[in-house]
Image: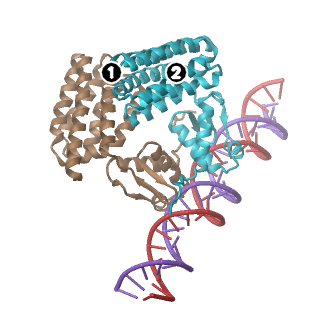
Chain colours: A brown, B cyan, C red, D purple
DNA sequence: ATATTGTATATTGGATCCATTTTTTCTATC
DNA sequence: GATAGAAAAAATGGATCCAATATACAATAT
């Protein structure tokens, strides 16, 4: 007898599904800052009970994406200017280091993939996809560092500020600048210049942070 | 009318209590790596139902302290040598930066508190308290950096490896060395030398990591 | 005797129900 | 008409109950 091996992988739990969906919605800005998240309402949306919803909300709170208060419920977390500043500064530190560690390990396939993401980013006109392509470009390079823990931290840090970044990229012409910076980083990687790639990554993140703070100050005032 | 301001703080939820207790037990090594955590059993220990226990376990999993599998339950997570190495390398990066940022903001009170923790560390003989005092010493200095997000990350990173460190400090004579390094860091802080304090912090963490890896290799072989 | 199959038990994920507290609405009074 | 207070509605945290699955063990066939 011969059967094709089918991967009967564990179906994701309801809590996982709800968590992923809410995380995505918050990151992409579909759920606005300060918006109320009702357990009942979310449970109905996913055709489930409030138990897995509560677990999902608890995880989101751990990652700082929402805040909850007893008997009051959950709201999408907002960030102060200081917090945004701090997160960008932190990302610059960690991502520059990850980039530096990655360069010696970059192979042709990885570089080719990064180049594709880079070109795709420049051509993309759908603002909703910029964020995703941006992540793909950087993560493709970062993955070569062989530092999964660093990457996990970078992911949660980026999660916190991604929706602000997307709003800014959409409403300003930051994409052009980001595209140029991406190309410069890619060039440094192709040259195997770890120090330069690291420095450019640092500047790239810090630039984005500065632009965002300016943007938000105008917007919020 | 004059009333004493009473802090009517929200009573911690059952899930918070269970989470804190389990986190502490894992960090301090009271729950051994690989140990099974049964929801029923934990719920009985805390005189509650399995619902808050599940929420606590979910949070612990998010922080990497346990792993769970459907229908199988939760076990205290173990770390490979590579993971331990990576976490120490990461801590060295972040804590060195936090230390550097903290030095210009250190005032007399903070320095005095740090000195007390430092002396306490050297005098303490109860191995179970070393970990706690060690954290207090470093956090007292780090707090002056005014970087709460960095500190939160440092905390979760330290959580992951703290029980290994405690085991090593207890079974070897690492305390003496750590004590000397603490004193050197404190000296640099008193001199206001941010670069030196940062470098010493980095070396302190990396040294601890190296000692721990050697210790674990001997122990596990 | 050993390998395989069926069954009982243990354990988890989720649904439903209850208690507590907040928020809103309605009413009575000024 | 405005305001204070009471009642109702809404929302959360937790307890209990149910369904699905894994593990352990007994029964059976070869």
**Residue depicted at 45% across the width and 46% down the height:** A60
Q: Nearer the viewer, residue B34 or B107?
A: B107
Q: Nearer the viewer, mark 2 or mark 1?
A: 2
Chain ID of residue with mark 1: A
Quick check: can you spot residue A205?
yes
Q: Quadrant of residue B193?
A: top left
Residue A181 x, y percent position in the rendering: 19, 30
Q: Which residue is mark 1?
A: A102
Q: Is residue A221 above or below residue B169?
A: below
- Relative to the observer, which residue lies in front, B184 or B204? B184
Q: In what element is the residue under mark 1?
A: helix
Q: Residues within 10 Å of mark 1 (few under 14, many from 20)?
A: many
How far across and down, in percent of the image, does residue B10 sit? 54, 53
Viewer-closest of B43 and B106: B106
Residue drawn at 44 percent across, 50 percent down: A67
For label 2, the residue is B118
Expressed as whole percent of the image width and height from the top left, the position of residue B123 reads 60, 18
Is residue C30 positioned above or below A81 on the image?
A: below
Quadrant (top left/top right/bottom left/bottom right) for the N terminus of chain A: top right
Q: Position of residue B2 (x, y in %)?
A: 51, 60
| C-alpha span from label 2 to label 1 | 38 Å
Location of residue A165 by image quarter? top left
Q: Helix, strand or loop at disc 2?
A: helix
In screen coordinates, is A8 left or right of A63?
A: right
Q: Which residue of the protein is positioned furthest toward the front in this rendering? A: B1
């Amino acid at each position: 007898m011969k059967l094709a091996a089918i991967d009967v992988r564990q179906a994701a739990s309801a809590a996982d599904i709800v968590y992923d969906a809410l995380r995505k919605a918050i990151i992409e800005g579909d759920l606005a800052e300060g918006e109320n998240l009702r357990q009942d309402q979310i449970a109905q949306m996913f055709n489930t009970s409030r138990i897995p919803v509560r677990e999902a909300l608890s995880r989101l709170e751990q990652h700082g994406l929402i805040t909850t208060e007893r008997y009051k419920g959950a709201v999408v977390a907002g960030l102060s200017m200081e917090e945004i500043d701090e997160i960008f500064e932190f990302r610059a530190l960690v991502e520059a280091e990850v980039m530096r560690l990655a360069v010696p390990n970059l192979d042709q396939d990885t570089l080719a993939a990064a180049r594709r993401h880079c070109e795709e980013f420049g051509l993309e006109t759908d603002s909703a996809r910029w964020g995703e392509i941006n992540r793909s470009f950087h993560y493709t390079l970062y993955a070569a560092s062989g530092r999964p823990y660093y990457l996990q931290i970078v992911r949660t840090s980026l999660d916190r500020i991604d929706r602000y970044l997307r709003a800014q990229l959409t409403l300003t012409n930051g994409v052009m600048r980001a595209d140029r910076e991406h190309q410069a980083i890619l060039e440094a990687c192709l040259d195997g210049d770890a120090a330069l790639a690291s420095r450019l990554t640092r500047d790239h993140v810090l630039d984005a942070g500065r632009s965002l703070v300016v943007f938000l100050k105008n917007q919020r005032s």
